[in-house]
Image (tube, helix red, strand yellow):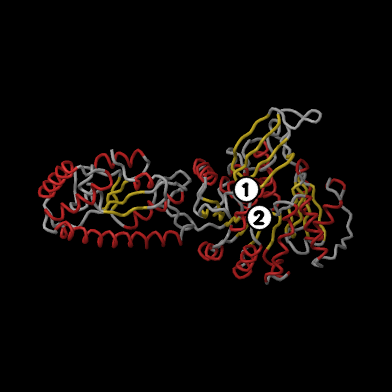
Amino acid sequence: MDVSADLTELSKSPVAVVCAGVKSILDIGRTLEYLETQGVPVITYQSDSFPAFYTPTTSHKGIARMDSPEECAEFIYAQNSLGLSNGSVIAVPIPEKDVCIDGEALDSAIDAALTEAEASGIKGKDITPFLLSKVKDMTEGKSLDSNIALIKNNAIVGSQIAVCLSRLAKSSASKPVLDTTGNNNAKSVAKLPKILVVGATNLDITGKFHSELSGNAKSAPGTVRFALGGVGRNIFESCFRTKGNVFFSSTIANDDTGKILLSQMTAKGLPLFGIQILPVSSQFSTSLYSGIFDKDGTTVAGVADMTIHESVGRDIVHTLQNLNPEIIAWDANIHPSVIAQCIEYANKKHAICVFEPTSVPKAAKIFEVMNLGITLQMLRETVKFITPNDLELSEIYSKALKYGYIDGEVSWKLPADMKVSSEVALAALSLSMIFDTIIVKLGSDGVFAISKCFYSASYYESLKIRGYRVAVWNEKLLIHFPSYKTEGPVVSVTGAGDSMVGVILTGLSRNLKIEEILEAGLMGAKFSLESDDAVSEHLTEAVFEK
């Protein structure tokens, strides 16, 4: 059986082919069967019948009928959003007015040409041009007229679909093709996302020892697994699972690692509208993180291949203009120029920015925007929240002192029941001159937060009565929450902080009070600690319930 390489390529390339069906000289039934085997959907346009180039109808059918360019565009957009690697066929019948050949006459011409080809020993790739030439001669050129007409018609329909697809892409946030909430009405329209998360998407390869290494041992029995990762991606999933109206902007490559990521995210029901897929190249590959953890889930060592993160947010201006988000969060993996563009937008639109420092070496990246036209005043007015751990906080504090953004002179005695180190308190209090709210992740000791206090004295007293560890300094509320105990042993700590930040974003979008947001965030972290995944599949909006 002679199978065209085009059919195989369609199973591997995300392209929509608009055509007039399959040439009548070929075996239509086997062609459609082969496409089905390869996972290539075949759509018939404004017809229930699959066309055969010169004739608009045959006895064969596609998997579905679509009657407008808009429907076809939505179908293509859904494929792209799901990250599927296969293509599709949209079969457009030749218009009746352009049919120049009677079906029976065409069949007779093809049969005669096939007989002549067999007698002449013509096979393989040579048979198609031979048959087309013979059919043209036998139909006195009518097949050529039909060919020209159908090409023009394909171009018209294809361009109409392309225009509709472009419109969908530009409004991808406001008109998602797939409703991931469980309502399968493909034409439902979601509200414009309030939250934009910009950041890294990784595939994590993690190894966890079953017991402590003995002596000078370099290896030991343990468990190795693949998992979805990336700080931005984790934050996005956590926010999405708690019903935050969120859009995620990230970048991967069209390589095997990227395909695994898309497949796993699709399986989790996560929307993929904002993930840019770059061609495979020597410059960029999908981000990979390989980590080794001890038996308690604490990181021993890790290797990160994350060059592609420099490309995250290339089209951030376009994304911001289309979404008009109220909250913008990013991790410190992205380029400072992207951070600067987010701040500029927030400054003009009065949006709230949230900075997740990600790691100690990257924590002070927030100040690199000062070399890109961002002023300290703009930073104060836009970046309202930062979510460092204690080490990242120390790095941000150190750089802020070095650059003269703060003076570090804070005289205040921390209440004993806060159970927070004086170094953490000093750094947070000093940085609160720049950032309205600082949420410091303290691992097993919970979180310590400083936030501008807009509450009355009676409200503050009510917090103390309810058992919160709180204090007030210079019109700022200080609050310490211990972490929630896990139901069993800690499985992994890699996604706990990210899960907490994602929940915090959802809480911010709901205009909840700081203590409500922190309680829910810590519950999100607890779910993560109990899970092999960075973000637990059990995490839901129930974390906000009292």
Label 2 and label 1: CA atoms lie apart by 9 Å
Q: Is residue 74 left or right of residue 432?
A: left
Relative depth, front residue between 308 and 41: 308
| Mark 1, residue position | 230
Residue drawn at point x = 75 percent, y = 51 percent: 440
Image quarter for residue 26? top left
Image quarter for residue 223? top right
Q: Are marks 2 and 1 in contact (CB under 8 Å)?
A: yes
Image disc number at residue 333: 2
- Percent of width and height locating residue 115: 14, 42
Q: Is residue 69 left or right of residue 79?
A: left
- Percent of width and height locating residue 55: 18, 51
Mark 1 surroundings within 10 Å by alpha-carbon count, few (fewer than 14), some (14 through 19), many (20 or more) = many
Q: Amino acid at mark 1?
A: Gly
Residue drawn at point x = 71 percent, y = 50 percent: 515
**Is residue 246 among what the camera can see?**
no
Of the 4 image quadrants, the one containing the C terminus is top right
Image disc number at residue 497: none
- If you read the primary sequence from the N terminus, does the residue marked by circle 2 or circle 1 appear first? 1
Q: Amino acid at mark 2?
A: Asn
Q: Secondary structure at mark 2?
A: loop
Relative depth, front residue between 242 and 48: 48
- Percent of width and height locating residue 461: 78, 52
**Is residue 84 among what the camera can see?**
yes
- Percent of width and height locating residue 164: 37, 60
Check the image and report above or below for 232 versus 39: below
Q: Secondary structure at mark 1?
A: loop
Of the 4 image quadrants, the one containing the N terminus is top left
Relative depth, front residue between 424 and 31: 31
